[in-house]
Amino acid sequence: MSEDIGWKVGGKQGEGIDSTGDIYAVALHRMGYYVFTYRHFMSLIKGGHTNYKVRSSNQVLRHHGDLVHVLVAFDPTTIDYNWHELVDGAVVIYDTAEFEAKAPDTRNVNLCGVPLTELAKESGNSIMKNMVAIGASACIHELDVEALRPVIQEKFGKKGPAVVEQNMAALQRGFAYFEEHFTVRFPLPRLKEQIPATTHLYASGNQAVGFGALAGGCRFLSAYPITPATEIMYWAIAQFPRYGGVVVQAEDEIAAMNMAIGANFTGVRAMTSTSGPGFSLMMEALGLAGMSETPVVVVDVQRSGPSTGLPTKTEQSDLNEALYGTHGEIQRIVLTPRTVEECFLLTAEAFNLAERYQLPVIVLSDMYLGMSSQTINEFPLDQIHHDRGKLLQVADLEKMGANTYQRYNLDVADGISARALPGQKNGRHVALGNEHSAVGLEIEDMPTRRAQVAKRQRKLADFQHFTGVYQEGNEKASAVLIGFGSTWGVLEEARLVLENSGFYLKHIHFSRLAPFPVEAFQKAMQGVETALVVEQNSTGQLAELIQKEVGFHDRLHRCLRFDGDPFTLQEIIARSEQVFSLGVLH
Amino acid sequence: MSTMADFKAEKPTWCPGCGDFGVLNAMQKACVNLGLAPEQVVVVSGIGCSGKMSQHFGGYGVHSLHGRSLPTAQAVKLANRELTVFAAGGDGDGYGIGMGHFIHAMKRNIDMTYVVMDNHIYGLTTGQASPTSDVGHQTKTSPHGTIESPIAPLQLALAQNCGFVAQGFSGNLKQLISLIERAVTHKGFSLVNVFSPCVTFNKINTYDFYREHLVNLDEEAGYNTHDRLTALDRVVGASNLVTGVIYEDPTRLSFADELFGYPKQPLAQASLELSKENYAEILTSFQ
């Protein structure tokens, strides 16, 4: 029995591929399985090729997996596109009414024609052919069709009991047909125990960012729709108003970012969420936040760039923009969550950091992390806390008296001067993007300029909040896999596979890249002779950052991918074997 | 009660005779007349001579980016609904680089007042053609005269169904004060476009020019400020050279009135905490 099962459905966009995948993934999740999904889609509404992968297991998954055991193909293209992922003896379910499937090579694959459309029609409507396919899949996985009923009820209940029953009938017809005609089975692994629903949650990185923001005290989101970040808006629109928060759909990302700055200036924790093209539009305002020392949180769910790039594909290529973007020089914090749980936690923490240091905090997610729904155990709610930094209260300002408050007071060792909020007496000031005096008036004299630049630079000089450097595997290993953000899962899985085959290595991963955690990283690198930096871009932005911050030029090798698809386990293992094959590793 | 002194800040750096002095005075006087406390007023400005307004006005302020005063100001108001919020800018700031935000601010209709110091020229960059420069105006960037049809802010505002549209003149302080008071009192987005002459770089649209050409609709008995079509007719007919309250619709609901779930107390004063029950409710959606 396999440890986990890969299932995929594919077809033309607009054929209901997404909802088919969703229904199946949620159903398996509700039964108690751990699922990890991956959506491959194109920037169009009808046609093209789209597919939805669901990997299921009886333990937590951190990657969508390389392999497919069951492929539901609504068109021949699906077979051509996904053939290479099929395991030996895999099942391909295809609609006999649509085409006759052909095997592109001599590999052992079971082509199982099922009259999907016909069986759907018999159940009441040809549109339910995806339900027939799910029924057939349930047979292959040896699942009870009735176990899918709660999800079907939830999805179609609004349309009335008749529609629910038709869909259930379609599932049963698919199951029965497959049972009668084919003997191949890929049973799902046995569930170890019954897990309570409260510690078995289904979430995407985008939803976790929305939840993290709300938990972190954010009550204002201004954003402009953009793939793959829009789900953050959806989540916030559904949830924020229930807890006293608002969401504004801005006219563009420039407005979205300036609104987030305006709301933060007024004292509300506010953020904006976007992807590459929108992030580029926010660069000038990012500088305003830095210069005016206004807290703000920006979430960039990266996609393939530059320009419009591959708008529905993943990449980690905005790192340099996050680190260096905007003209002039500002202080900033850049966080790169590794997992759905960290999307939650680091987004929440971003608000504390933004207020404590009075600067922009950028959370760099990506499409793979943002849009892949998966089963997690729980959100780390117990780690949520709120720290508003140097924020004056009405009573503080009353004590200070009139005309004494200085918003950009230079006499602060840590560089952080106290904030006052509009509405507070004696706190009157102007936040501004011009260089300014201690009271916040624009200046052009050189000593003040030098003093204010130095003040702002002091803010992050001694950043000790959390290292953001994680280490897994054998501490003493001389070979290391290095990554940041969403590649955590695939790198951990690769490390475990390599470890099982006798490779002696460790895995270092970043969830904070600015300020760069020099000390912690140097410590983790002790004894390392060969490092493979794995990142989803074409120039090796993380490798270059490491070289700039700490060196190790002779020891860094690169593993890059920039075609829009997330890393496969196999390519990381193959590249590791190549790079680490110097004999020192066994 | 507040006085003019409470709303004074740094001594303005505008050229002597600049129309913007009148606008600053009118904003300060209107706030005094309305009984506002300086800490309850926020002025968000963009960039340009007009952008200095936030530093010259004695309330809270943001001297934001070129063209971006409106998004910033709208968020300030949403974040604390008890504040009185102004955006202040010029014709280049608001009708050039920030034009998209202007149209959308009228569409969104958040309760705030937008004061535009319209001098038909780029002043701080020393005299280039602006979005409202008249056809034929010779400037450093239009040595042969401008050839583009100028932006007509009042006509755009009327087309976009802005709930309060007014136009004033720096040379008529009494009227300007009253226009700003009425704009602040209006519940929704208000536009006050002000002819604010640039005495240094615009020798065409001068105080004398405006005194000669402006038609004051406030003084016209029988002018109906609630009739949008008449308003448009008069504005077009006078080649935009009118002053007064051009149009108002007190019945239009503001963004805050319509926004689902928008709390009555200011967002800025709300607790950051979620209760155990809140968390339990949210977690259910992830099951």
Image: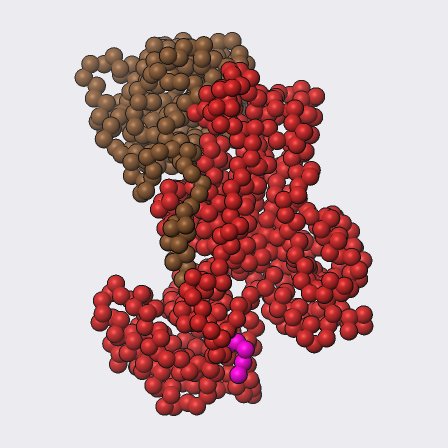
Residue B244 in the image, given as x and y percentages of width and height? 30, 17
Residue A201's quadrant in the figure? bottom left
In front of the other: A389 or A572: A389
* Relative to A352, A471 lies left or right: right
In front of the other: B129 or B27: B27
Tell me if residue A323 comes above or below residue A527 in the rendering. Answer: above
Q: Is residue A102 magenta?
A: no
Residue A549 in the image, given as x and y percentages of width and height? 74, 47
In front of the other: A208 or B130: A208
In front of the other: A332 or A2: A2
Residue A167's quadrant in the figure? bottom left
Whether residue B197 is visible, yes or no, is: no
**What is the quadrant of the C terminus of chain A in the image?**
bottom right
Q: Main secondary structure of the magenta part?
A: loop
* Relative to A101, A415 lies left or right: right
Which chain comes out red in the rendered image? A
Residue displayed at 68% across by 75% down = A500
* Relative to A353, A272 lies left or right: left
Which chain comes out brown in the rendered image? B
Residue B257's quadrant in the figure? top left
Residue A40 in the image, given as x and y percentages of width and height? 49, 65
Whether residue A423 is visible, yes or no, is: yes
Tell me if residue B18 comes above or below residue A422 in the rendering. Answer: above
Residue displayed at 61% across by 22% down = A438
The mark total stands at 0
Residue B226 in the image, given as x and y percentages of width and height? 22, 25
Residue displayed at 67% across by 62% down = A472
Magenta stretch: give its range.
A1-5
Coloration of the structure image: by chain
